[in-house]
Image (cartoon, rainbow, N blue to C red):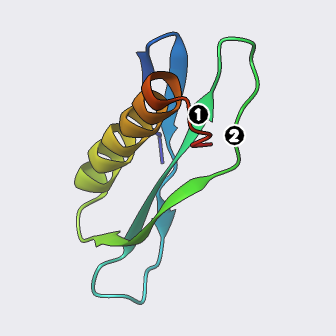
Amino acid sequence: MQSLHCDYRDYTITASVMPHPDSPLPYAAGCLITDPAGNTSRRISMPMKFFADLENAQHVSLAHGRALVDQQLDEGSKAF
């Protein structure tokens, strides 16, 4: 499975979708965030966010990562 990624505000966000094959919604959304210095966060999951479609789960994961980068840069709060 190839993970989607994007560059956003000098950070790289990588979708980290976990498969749960026995579930009716088999994909759990999450992301990894790499800062400009090359440090990568732990996997940041989206609580209770499961999807039936892999592509949808990856796009939501990237959006969640962008929101976390915004939160950390704009609000100054430690988001990851």
Residue 51, image quadrant? bottom left
Q: Residue 14 at what x, y percent from top left?
A: 51, 35
Answer yes or no: do the residues labelled 2 and 1 have beta carbons within 8 Å? Answer: yes
Q: Residue 19 at what x, y percent from top left?
A: 47, 69
**Which residue is rendered at x = 38% and y = 32% of the image?**
66
**Which residue is rendered at x = 57% and y = 43% of the image?**
79
Cα distance between the residues tagged 2 and 1 = 5 Å
- Foreground: 66 or 51? 66
Three-letter residue code for mark 2: Ser
Q: Is residue 69 above or below residue 21?
A: above
Residue 9, image quadrant? top left
- Whether residue 17 is visible, yes or no, is yes
Residue 38 relative to residue 49: left or right: right
- Whether residue 4 is visible, yes or no, is no
Q: Which of the numbered marks, if any, corresponds to residue 20? A: none
Q: Which residue is mark 2?
A: 41
- Foreground: 53 or 15? 15
